[in-house]
Amino acid sequence: MDYIPATEKDIKEMLNIVGVTSINDLVRDFIPAFTGKMNLPQPKSELELVRHMRGLAHTNKILRCFVGAGAYNHYIPSAVSHLLARGDLFTGYTPYQAEISQGTLQAIYEFQSFICLLTGMDVANASLYEGASALAEAALLSCSYTGRDRIFVKERLHPQYLEVLQTYCEGAELTLTDRIDNDTACVIAQNPDFYGNVENLHYLAEQAHRVGALFTTCIVEPTSLAILEPPGKYGADIVAGEAQSFGIPLSFGGPYLGFIAVKDFLLKKLPGRICGMTTDSRGNRGFVLTFQAREQHIRRERATSNITTNQALMALAATIYLALMGRSGLTTVAKLSYARAHLLNRKLEKAGFRNLNSKPFYNEFVVKAPRSAEELASRLLKKGIVGGVNLGEDNFLICCTEMNSIQDIDDFVSAVAGD
């Protein structure tokens, strides 16, 4: 499509309609006119400017983070950002001319392979936007496959994921129900759940399959997959969740990276794009996009989704991270996160906190504070510690990763243990 700029006449007509005489009038209330002289210092050389900026940076206070609840502070190898910033990767939006984007398609294929290895599933797509909408897409897929319209959600699903799921269900005229019966399309359970509890979900998968429903596992902290049983082993038909833990910084809330993986029989219902590996006429390995289930690809009313693309750059970051870490590196991250969380939990119990987790936990847990949670959060902040999520009624949701040192844990306990 050609770009046709607005002419001076067009601009004048638009300004007249809104009742102003110039474009500056539109922003005058927000950006007042400046008529004085700016009090700027003398120009600096590059060396002086770099020194000045580093001095400013050193005044920043780096807080130690014990917050989880769907966003996790993990170490990111420097190679991830360096490779991601390459111009041929950083500027590419999505492979519209797929067959000549072989590098991008190979990265997508490897991302899909990593997700399948971690989840124990047969097929994964090229990624989705973030975990909450990935879970909602899993619910839509289930209803499309079974022809049913009821969804059972096990307690302790991340509340924001539940809100997104409710929004999707409202638009699609689906119903969230509190029982599993012959009208149930999908059974959803988060593992570890929002409070960090880890559960053996074989029984729930069996319940779902007994009535002809699909079983979906939601994974919000995917490093747990390095040491926990893969969902595919305990009967999951769909695994959906968030991959932010794989090489993506917290960044004030985004961008994040959703993923979804399924068993073979759901391949043609899988939303978004899927990359496959093949050979060309000369026998050379090649990669192609295939099985796209969106409505634009002739599916129309049979489409399971309107997802038109994938979170390509973030999926690439996750792929680089997982390739660098390898099986042993990711297992080390998971074991350290587990050990540090349990160490902090034990020390807090000795300091008068009550453990509220009813089941084993991975790297998050809930404790009841012996006094005001707000007061304790304030104490921690003064020590440069963000101490977790206040759930109300003096209950704290606390998370540890490999980024929390033993010294950080001791400082946390010292700050809340008393006078």
Image: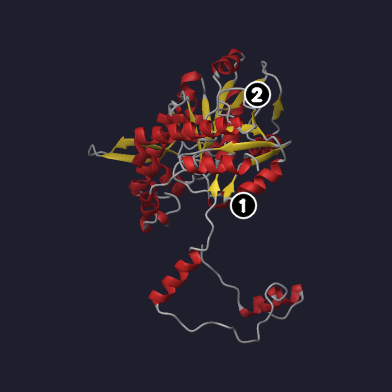
Nearest-to-viewer mark from 1 and 2: 1
Alpha-carbon distance for marks 1 and 2?
A: 53 Å
The amino acid marked with disc number 1 is Lys
Farthest residue in the left direction?
282
Task: Examine the rendered structure and indicate whether residue 23 appears above or below residue 362.
Answer: below
* Residue 317 left/right relative to 359: left
Which residue shows up at 53% across the image and 52% down it?
251
Q: Residues within 10 Å of mark 1 (few under 14, many from 20)?
A: few
* Residue 64 left/right relative to 392: left
Q: Is residue 328 visible?
A: yes
Instruction: Give the percent coordinates (x, y) of residue 384.
Output: 57, 51
Q: Residues within 10 Å of mark 2 (few under 14, many from 20)?
A: some
Residue that badge 1 annotates: 382
Instruction: Give the percent coordinates (x, y) of residue 85.
Output: 39, 56
The amino acid marked with disc number 2 is Arg
Task: Examine the rendered structure and indicate whether residue 71 appears above or below residue 348.
Answer: below
Farthest residue in the top direction?
210
Q: Quadrant of residue 208?
A: top right
Instruction: Give the percent coordinates (x, y) of residue 34.
Output: 65, 82
Contact, mark 1 vs mark 2 (Cβ under 8 Å): no
Name the residue nearer the viewer: 63 or 28. 63
Residue that badge 2 annotates: 148
Instruction: Give the percent coordinates (x, y) of residue 252.
Output: 57, 52
Which residue shows up at 56% across the image and 33% down it?
347
